[in-house]
Amino acid sequence: MASNKEEVKLFGMMLSPFVTRVEIGLKLKGVGYKYELEKMGNLSEALINYNPVYKKVPVLVHNEKPVSESLIILEYIDETWKQNPILPSDPYKKALAHFWSKFIDDKFLSAIKKAIFTIDEKERENGIEETEVALQFLENEIKDKFFGGEDIGFVDISAVLIAYWLPIVQEVVGLNLFTHEKFPKLYKWSQDFTNHPIVKETLPSRETLLPYFKARYETFLASK
Amino acid sequence: MASNKEEVKLFGMMLSPFVTRVEIGLKLKGVGYKYELEKMGNLSEALINYNPVYKKVPVLVHNEKPVSESLIILEYIDETWKQNPILPSDPYKKALAHFWSKFIDDKFLSAIKKAIFTIDEKERENGIEETEVALQFLENEIKDKFFGGEDIGFVDISAVLIAYWLPIVQEVVGLNLFTHEKFPKLYKWSQDFTNHPIVKETLPSRETLLPYFKARYETFLASK
C-alpha cells in the first residue's frame, strides 16, 4: 500500500520502450518519481545492485525495494496505487491482458529482431513474415478504441513499442511492415494511443530516436 | 468468480512440466477437471482453436473460456478459486514471485537447453555455466522451507522442472549440474517439494520420464 512518505525512483535509459512503459504507468497513476539516468555500457553500481540478475533498466525502487522487468513493474504499480486501474480486475480479462503482453515480448519482439538484425536473407524473410503474423493477431484483438476498452490499459502500454518504435524502425530499415493498408485497426489504435496526452508527453522525440536507430542499424550493416 | 455449475477442462500432454504446473495448481485448490489428452504431432482441432497463437498445451478451458501459457493459467486459477492462495497478496511479494517464475522460464530454461541440445562444444559449456549461475540465484532465494514460505506457492510450482525434471535429464545426459554438494538449499527444497503429497501424486513416474528423455537425447545425438 502507498504510504504518505514515499520514495519512488526509476532507473532508466533514454529511448528505451521498456522504460517508457513504466513511465506511462507512473504518470497514469499520478505518482511522482525521481529519474535516475543510466548510460549504456556504463551502468551505475546502484543499478547492478538492484538488478543483479539482468543488470538492466528499467528498475523501479519504491521505498528501497527494487522491482525489475517492465511488465512486472507495471503490475506492481497498478496494485500499489489503486487509482486509474491498468489491469482489469476480472480474472479472465486479466489473464488475456497478461497473455497479449507476453505475446508482444515473446513473439513480436523475436520476430522483429529477426526481420531487422539478421544477415541470412532467408532468415530475414522469415522474420518479416513472423512479424506480420504477430501484427495480424494483434489487429484481430482490437475490439474497442484501445486494447483496454475505452481507456488505455496493460496491453496498450505493453504495445508502445509497436505504436511508436516500430514505425520509426521500419523507416530506417526500409521496410513496410506496419501500414494503415495492412493493419487498419492497429494503425488507427497506434494513432489514438500515441496521441493520448500522457503517452504523448512521455514518448522520446522522433528527432532523437530516428538518428539513434540509423546509427545502430548502420553499425549492424557494417558488421555483416 | 467460481459458480456452482463449472466446467473445467485441461488440455495436456504426458510428461510436460508445464502441464504439471497447472495440475498442481488445480489440485491445490481442490478443483475437479477433465483431462483432455493431446498427442505430440497430432494435436486436436479443439486445442488449435483454443490456442491458435502457440498451438500447444497446456490450455485450461473454464466454462468455454480458454487460457493459455502455464504461468498465466496458474495465476488465473489462483484468482478464480480463492482457497489455498498460490500467489502472495502483498504487491511486492507478488512482484518477486512473478520475477523468479519468469526467470525460470527465461534464463534457466534457455541455459539448460543450451547445455543439453547444443552441438558446438564451446556453446554447450557456456550453457552449463549459465545453468549453474541460474541455479545459484535460486539457491540464494530460498529463505524458508519453500520459495513461498512454509507452504508451496507460485515459484515452487514454476520450479517443478528443476525439482523433478532436471535430475532425470542430467542423469540421461551424464551431467552433474544439480547436486546436493553444489546447491544444498535448492536440493533440500527439491526433496521437500517433490514429497509434498499433492505434488507427489501429480508427477509422472520416473519409469516413463527416463526412457522418454533417453530416446529424445539419442535422437539429438544421432542428428549431430
Image (cartoon, coloured by chain):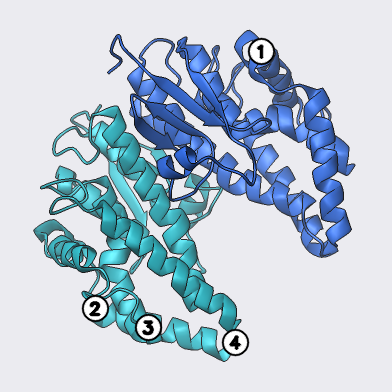
Chain colours: A cyan, B blue
Disc marking residue A223: 4
Q: Secondary structure at mark 3?
A: loop
Inspect the image, locate mark 1, and give the three-letter code of the amino acid beneath it.
Glu
Q: Position of residue A28 (x, y in %)?
A: 16, 47
What residue is shown at x 57% (from left), y 83% (from top)?
A121
Horizontal and vertical percent position of residue A114: 52, 71
Report the front residue among B81 and A203. B81
Frontmost of labels 4 and 3 is: 3
Residue B37's place in the image compared with B215, above or below, is above
The answer to whether mark 1 and mark 2 are in CB contact below 8 A is no
Residue B108 in view (yes/no): yes
Residue lying furthest bottom in this view?
A222
Which of the two labelled residues, at mark 2 and mark 3, occupies the earlier sequence position?
Answer: 3
Dot 1: element: helix
* Chain letter, disc 3 residue: A
Looking at the image, is mark 1 or mark 2 nearer the viewer?
1
- Which residue lies under the disc numbered 3? A175
Say which element carries label 4: loop
